[in-house]
Image: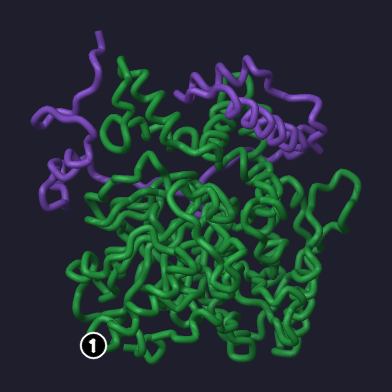
Amino acid sequence: MKKHWQDWAQTLSSPEAEARWLEHVRRSEEKVGAFLQFDPELGRPQSGSAGPLAGVPFAVKDNIAVRDFRLTCGSRLLEDLISPYTATAVEKLQRAGAVVVGKTNLDEFGMGSSCENSALKVTSNPWDETLVPGGSSGGSAAAVAAGMVPFALGSDTGGSVRQPAAFCGIYGLKPTYGAVSRYGLVAYASSLETIGVIAGTVARTREVFSCMCGKDPQDHTSLDYRPAPAKKGPFTVGIPRLAPAGKEGSEQISLHPDVAAALDKTRIALQELGFCLREIELPNLDLVVSSYYVIAMAEASANLARFDGVRYGRRALDAESPEELMRLSRSRGLGEEVKLRILLGTYVLRSGFQDRYYLRAQKIRSALRMSFHKAFAEADLILLPTYPYPPFKKGGQTLDPFAQKLADLYTCTANLAGLPALSFPACLENGMPTGMPVGMQFMAPAFAEERLFAACSLFEKHFPAPSCPLAAGEV
Amino acid sequence: MFNGLHFLMDRNELTVTARLALLDVSGDEMERLEVEVGRMLDYFSQMKDLEIEEPSAAGGPVAENQLREDLVRPTHEKKGADTLLENAPEREDRFISIPNVL
């Protein structure tokens, strides 16, 4: 048992520690609402008693299957679904001894950046209950930041692990595409998404990742984990030249002053820690959000066709024909954001429109991959803000759903290119004007997760994750 | 950007698309979705000036075929298919029932 788990391993083995923990979870949940289902007893018998993570509790986003737990995906349609099987990534962690204690809230099917698209629950940011926790893995990030679990699993299709981790002041890893099996992850956009880790320290993130990566016969896009050749520091960090705000024809979003200030401070801190910084070019950055949404929605329209109320899920019992049954079950069971994405996805794939949208989006994707290839010839890592804004208010007034989509710019590039990225709490010395966490992310070449961990743990030594007041009673 | 005046998909196109997607959309929801769909398509139209020669490619960073033997394997679930049937909304014995087809 590594030192960084020690406190947590006792949680489920000593009755006194467990009682204290349950009380902390109860109190925090009243404020945060991270869990859609919390039931440590259900998870306990499924885990091995020995292993590097023996007895460590963790939470799982509710679009990742865990046998006997519900699998709602935050949707009315699947509210009563009990999973008959367990995702490979979860099974590997259970074999290492970790115990699933519950399922966390999310934007319905992972579609959103605030957790507000969940049809089942409202989740708040543990730092400030008037703010969103981010999304779509908002429940997982909130549970970790509030000290309810030491780590949680999420899924990242366009930033859904990194953005909530940034909003909650913790670490969020989106692994290389194919490094972690997607078997048991409810598919939204298959070519973009990965299961990722949210944790309070780099060491925990790293160990969880190393327990769950590797090829899985149940997922033919998974690959043997062959780490990229190790590289000793000091690392060269590429910083993309971001187009000035308001540039003619540019759709790029200018950074919120807090994020811009955090980026500056982080840049200076990295230099002081011995990193070499270098400006790099990432052309066509203003087209990646279009490319990302066309591809994600096209894949979503196909993947979500399976939710028809026939074999599982909430069924329209008043339907008089099989087709009506599917139409009514879907129309009543799916939320508006999900319908929007299915409609757009269906549209861009209709005959006659593919050239205009889908094929162009794939070309942008290929070109982006090439630009990263070039960029990594001159830099070991790339630094980008995780999100252009700090955590925003609930209710969609400060940032409406359309603006939230455009703000995926900095995260969705890693998904389009299949590359790993790790969001870490930025340097906040002297406090930011809002006092809220801000995240930065390192991106690395495929299978170079170790480089992300090395760079982030060096940074963490000097700028550890801020401690959320709600987690003060941690364990 | 979106100016609220022109939509790239008219109401009729949206209805056809909804039918293809097996979704009923009407009333207020239709109005809201029409605006959002228009906004996104307008945004996507920035791709029209694109001049990129590269062939399109999908998938992850490693492009190689992953094949397996075509074999029957036992399910790893304890109760096999019965576990799956437990989630069916309406059943008759081991059959999932739906409204009459004819």
What residue does disc 1 label? A14
Amino acid type shown at disc 1: Ser
Residue closer to the observer: A22 or A305: A22
Q: Chain of mark 1?
A: A
- At horizontal 76% and vertical 49% (from top left) the residue drawn is A286
Residue closer to the observer: A251 or A261: A261
Residue A241 sits in quarter: bottom right
Left/right placement of residue A96 relative to residue A177 reads left
Picture coordinates of residue A369 (x, y %)? 64, 53
Left/right placement of residue A18 relative to residue A185 reads left
Picture coordinates of residue A260 (x, y %)? 79, 70
**Label 1 neighbourhood size at 10 Å, few (<14), some (14-19), many (20+)?**
few
Left/right placement of residue A404 relative to residue B18 reads right
Query: Which chain is rendered green in the image?
Result: A
Picture coordinates of residue A204 (x, y %)? 44, 80
- Where's the N terminus of chain A, which quadrant? bottom left
Residue closer to the observer: A331 or A90: A331
Query: Relative to A191, is A276 above or below?
Result: below
